[in-house]
Amino acid sequence: MNIDQRIDQSVTRVCTTVFPFLTNHHNTLFGGKAMSIMDEVGFMAATRFCRKPLVTVSTDRIDFSKAIPAGSIIEAIAKVESVGRTSIKVKVEVFLERMYEEGRELAMEGKFTYVALDDNKKPMPVLEGLKN
């Protein structure tokens, strides 16, 4: 399998409902919880891409462009954007769907970088040993 096929097969989508226990004092999705969801779905996509132990090493930027009210449905979509020797960069987009309305809109997006670690917790090549 070539790299483009591997990227396509590792796209990860996670949906959840924004219940009140996930919200802040404005009754919108708490930013820390949103970042946690984004990191988790990004981690899943990166892991599906390389099937190696990974850790999050950085986020380039997270843009919160739309508040997500309680009672909404969100879908987080992660796709590998680039691959380095020991790292994988993943773009994550979060879409807002109002529970009783048609359509959806981009509410947040960010980029996360993950590094593959060997048994000694040292960076290791992400593509080494993968079957084609």
Image (cartoon, rainbow, N blue to C red):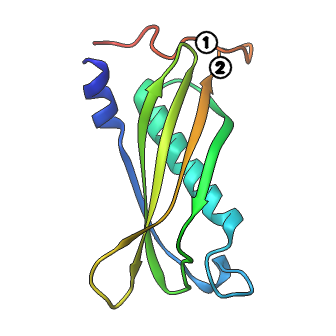
Give the residue displayed 57% in from the left and 82% down from the top: 19
Q: Are marks 1 and 2 in contact (CB under 8 Å)?
A: yes
- As drawn, 12 above or below 33: above
- As drawn, 125 above or below 76: above
Residue 31: which disc?
none
How far apart are the two marked residues, 1 and 2, measured between alpha carbons?
Answer: 5 Å
Question: Of callouts 1 and 2, which one flags the residue occurring earlier in the amino acid sequence?
Answer: 2
Residue 124: which disc?
1
**Foreground residue, 25 or 124?**
25
Crowdedness near tag 2: few (<14), some (14–19) or many (≥20) residues, C-alpha within 10 Å: some
**Residue type at tag 2:** Leu
**Quadrant of res 3:** top left
- The spot of residue 5 in percent (x, y) is 25, 27
**Foreground residue, 72 or 63?**
63
**Quadrant of res 100:** bottom left
**Foreground residue, 8 or 105?**
105
Indicate the quadrant containing the C terminus: top left, top right, bottom left or bottom right: top left
Give the residue displayed 50% in from the left and 49% down from the top: 41
Please give the count of numbered marks on the rendered protein: 2
Q: Which residue is mark 2?
A: 117
- The spot of residue 65 in percent (x, y) is 54, 68
Crowdedness near tag 1: few (<14), some (14–19) or many (≥20) residues, C-alpha within 10 Å: some
- The spot of residue 60 in percent (x, y) is 63, 41
- The spot of residue 23 in percent (x, y) is 66, 80
**Quadrant of res 26:** bottom right
**Foreground residue, 102 or 63?**
63
Give the residue displayed 59% in from the left and 26% down from the top: 53
Side of 94 relative to 6 (left or right): right
Q: Secondary structure at mark 2?
A: loop
**Residue type at tag 1:** Met
Indicate the quadrant containing the N terminus: top left, top right, bottom left or bottom right: top left
